[in-house]
Amino acid sequence: MKHFKFTVFVCFFGLMACQPKGSLIYQYPDTENIGINQLVVVIDYLNLRDDIGKYWDYDSYYHQKTLDHLLAQTNDTMQQNGYPPAESYLLSSGLLIKNDFPVEHYIKEQLQPELLHPPYTLALKSIDDTQVTQHQEVLSVMIKYLATRRHIKNDELSHRGMQMGYHFESIDLPDDTAILYIHVNQSAVGIIKQLGSILLSGAIASQADYGFIGVDLSTPKHASAFLVHTGSGQILWKNHSNNWNTDQPVAELLKLIPQKIKNQLP
């Protein structure tokens, strides 16, 4: 098992929900008792385009360029909040598409002969291949049940279900790891409804375990981020936006993320 000085995972995603008044930002109230010494980033970004043909269009060059840009900005933002650079990362496009969903492959807008199948882009650094499916499962749970959930400060019900617990038991990471998952979908409007049945198919966990969520798949663009502590499975912070896009600074999506939490004592 690899050991790092600090780990945070980032992954981007979001879905719209009808919720009572409150903030889409969640902050765990007891971060001073959480020890973190490692940082890993997991980012999932998808921007499928419409076409007159049978398949949606995917440009691998521009997706990889955007993923690299998001990773660099995320690293900068996290360091400004006291975190060390991420020594491990997972960059993907289409990580949450669990069924086969082929797309036409473009490179710099030039059509390629082969179709691509999800995940359309996958780049790993210091992450075991076997962990990819595990992170896919964790992100799916958070997106399906928690991304659009509203939170009210000092309301005990706001903390219900914001604990991933056993979902992290199979991920081979030190307990003092923080994972920042970020998912962004800027695809064409029609693809969201088409993907909805794929992304939300299959019950990974009971919805009752995570609170009350109503998902509206008509929202074409969305972004979500979650900061999770692996040792406890606690979600320390999360945010969801239907307005943020990759033309804006990542710091705007990661607003109010907690300052680096104390190092774990030996």
Image: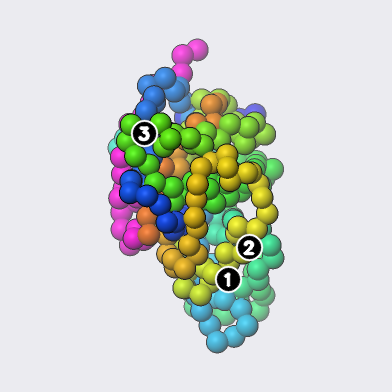
Q: Is residue 248 left or right of residue 9?
A: left
Q: Is residue 260 left or right of residue 126?
A: left
The residue sitting at 45% across, 43% down in the picture is: 226
Mark pair 3, 1: CA separation: 36 Å
* The stretch drawn in magenta includes residue 263: yes
Q: Quadrant of residue 120?
A: bottom right
Which residue is disc 2 drawn over? 198
Please report the bounds of the magenta region as a residue range: 243-266
Residue 130: x and y in percent read 69, 43
Q: Specify the quadrant of the image occupied by residue 174.
A: top right
Residue for point 51% across, 25% down: 176
Q: Is residue 97 left or right of residue 23?
A: right
| Residue beneath disc 3 | 155
Q: Give me the disc on residue 194.
A: 1
One can see residue 97 in this view: no
Packing grade of label 2 (10 A; few <14, some 14-19, many >=20) is some
Q: Are marks 1 and 2 in contact (CB under 8 Å)?
A: yes
